[in-house]
Amino acid sequence: MNRPREIPYRDELLADRSVHRRYEDGREEWRRRESGTTVRWHDNLGASGTDELLGQRIVKRQFADGRVVYGRDIGYGRTVWGQDGTVLVNRTSFGGRMGVLLGGLGLATLAVTAAQYPPVSLSPEEEEELRQQAQSSSSSGGGDGGGGDTGGDGGDGGDWDSGDSWNSDDGGSWSDDDFG
């Protein structure tokens, strides 16, 4: 097991129903849901792209320049990104605050195991299979969970219910469990 580097963040719902995410390392993102499984984002470092929730709690971050990185929601408002195990911690949500509390107590259950790392890469066919799994899971009433995103290498860290929506097109509401 590995004790990863953690980067906490907080989300703020803005009047236009987008989300302003502030990371404790100084990065900031502005996020807007495009569909039930896709969020478009841009950050204060000049990067932009989309985060897409796939199945098995995997999040695909595609940068505008075509680069792709994957993350995995590991619960308690935490998302692990890349093979270095960087974990984004959502301090906005109850799960994220609970994860920080449990981690502060030094509980080993919050360490990252090899099974929790996201894939290094996926083929288009593997991505489509995960999308289908997520779609069938959400249509049967179960959520896959997910998280997703950050500038740089990583992702978000909230538990995400793809049935919730908070974009300005559908009048839905944002909750602190959305990955943003």
Image: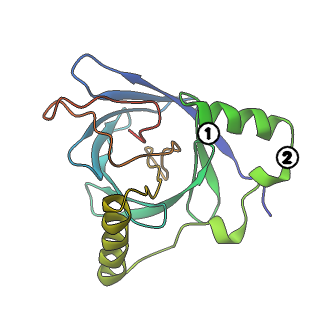
Query: From the viewer's perspective, is 112 left or right of 176?
Result: right
The residue shown at (37%, 81%) is 126
Q: Position of residue 162 (x, y in %)?
A: 35, 49
Q: Which residue is mark 1?
A: 7
Closer to us: 134 or 1:
134
Looking at this view, name the residue that lies furthest to the top.
15
Q: Could you tell me the amino acid type at mark 2?
A: Leu
Q: CA distance from mark 2 to mark 1?
A: 18 Å
Identify the residue under disc 2: 107
Q: Is residue 88 above or below residue 1?
A: above
Specify the quadrant of the image occupied by residue 123. bottom left
Crowding near the residue tagged with mark 2, few <14, some 14–19, many ≥20 C-alpha atoms within 10 Å: few
* Left or right side of 118 for 175: left
Q: Amino acid at mark 1?
A: Ile
Locate the C terminus and report the quarter of the image it occupies: top left
Answer with mark 2 or mark 1, whichever residue precedes in sequence: 1
Q: How is the image coloured?
A: rainbow
Query: Residue at horizontal 38%, vertical 56%?
Result: 141
- Disc 2 element: loop
Whether residue 46 sits left or right of residue 176 in the image: it is: left
**SS at circle 1:** strand
Q: How many marks?
A: 2
| Marks 2 and 1 in Cβ contact (< 8 Å) | no
